[in-house]
Image (cartoon, rainbow, N blue to C red):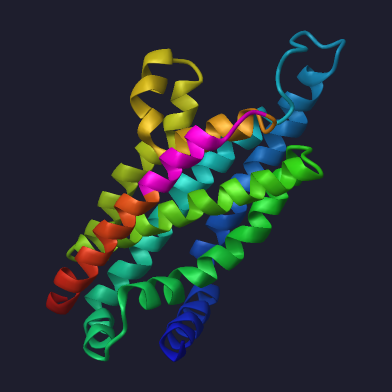
Amino acid sequence: MNSIKAVFIKQALDMFRNKVVLIQFILFPLIALIFTELVSKPNAAPNSAEPNMPYSMFVTIFAAVFIGYTLLTTTAGIIAEDTERKSLRFLIMAGVKPHEYFLGVCGIILLVTLPVSVVFGLIGNFSGIAIIKFICVMMCGSVASMLLGAAVGILSKNQQSAHAASMSVAVIIGFGPMITMFNETAGKILGVLYTQQINVIVNDLSAGTMRPLSVIAANIAVFAALFGIAYMKKGLKG
């Protein structure tokens, strides 16, 4: 518990000093708000030219981008910085376990992600059970993204390579659901990704969630195993 607390405090101080990271947590909710107010809201009205446009359309799109892009690249950059500065090696030698390090580093990111998820839900006009379901799905996706980002960060040689690698992965993870809205084949291929399943759930919060949640859970399990192996093997070499 002390290890988690120490890493959490360190990362909280580092994160709130980094204005670039904080801006990323504001950017996509802001874009979602602008598109919702200027495009979805007018076109969702019964007397509009396109009355069938969902009010939450852009919330769905940019929430997936936020989870798959912002959280993944942010986590990868943080972990790569610890690896490059040799901090990770010292933590492993001090007996800090993979789950303790992950909870310490990503706990603060998850804490900041929670209010962002609430904002997304409010922009999408969700309420009651729907917004609670939306937030829970966002949190599950956040864990998956942070685990994948953490694995990418540890496996990268430095921050620069982590940035390049995480950006490449994040473009597919984050923007994949947007592509599937216009291409059915892409939807079938990218259906194995957690962001696509989040998209499925959020597009119809009243539908069943067993299959999508099973896919998300499988993603989390795979990424957790990858992170754990990378932490123990690569971390000591950093």
Residue 16, percent from left and from top = 55, 75
Q: What segment is highlighted magenta in the picture? A: 207-219
Instruction: Give the residue displayed 44% in from the left and 43% down from the top.
Output: 216
Which secondary structure is most common in the magenta stretch? helix
Q: Is residue 73 magenta?
A: no
Instruction: Give the residue displayed 42% in from the left and 39% down from the top.
Output: 215
Position of residue 178 relative to residue 124, above or below, is above
Query: Which quadrant holds residue 4?
Result: bottom left
Q: Is residue 5 left or right of residue 115?
A: left
Q: Nearer the viewer, residue 218 or 141?
A: 218
Residue 94, percent from left and from top = 26, 91
Instruction: Give the residue displayed 81% in from the left and 45% down from the top.
Output: 128
| Residue farthest to the right, as pictured | 47
Q: Is residue 139 left or right of residue 49?
A: left
Instruction: Give the residue displayed 48% in from the left and 16% down from the top.
Output: 182
Position of residue 6 relative to residue 12, above or below, is below
Q: Is residue 209 magenta?
A: yes
Query: Which quadrant holds residue 48?
Result: top right
Q: Quadrant of the C terminus?
A: bottom left
Position of residue 190 relative to residue 32, above or below, is above
Residue 124, percent from left and from top = 73, 37
Query: Which quadrant holds residue 63?
Result: top right
Q: Is residue 161 left or right of residue 15?
A: left
Residue 223, percent from left and from top = 32, 53
The number of numbered badges drawn on the structure is 0
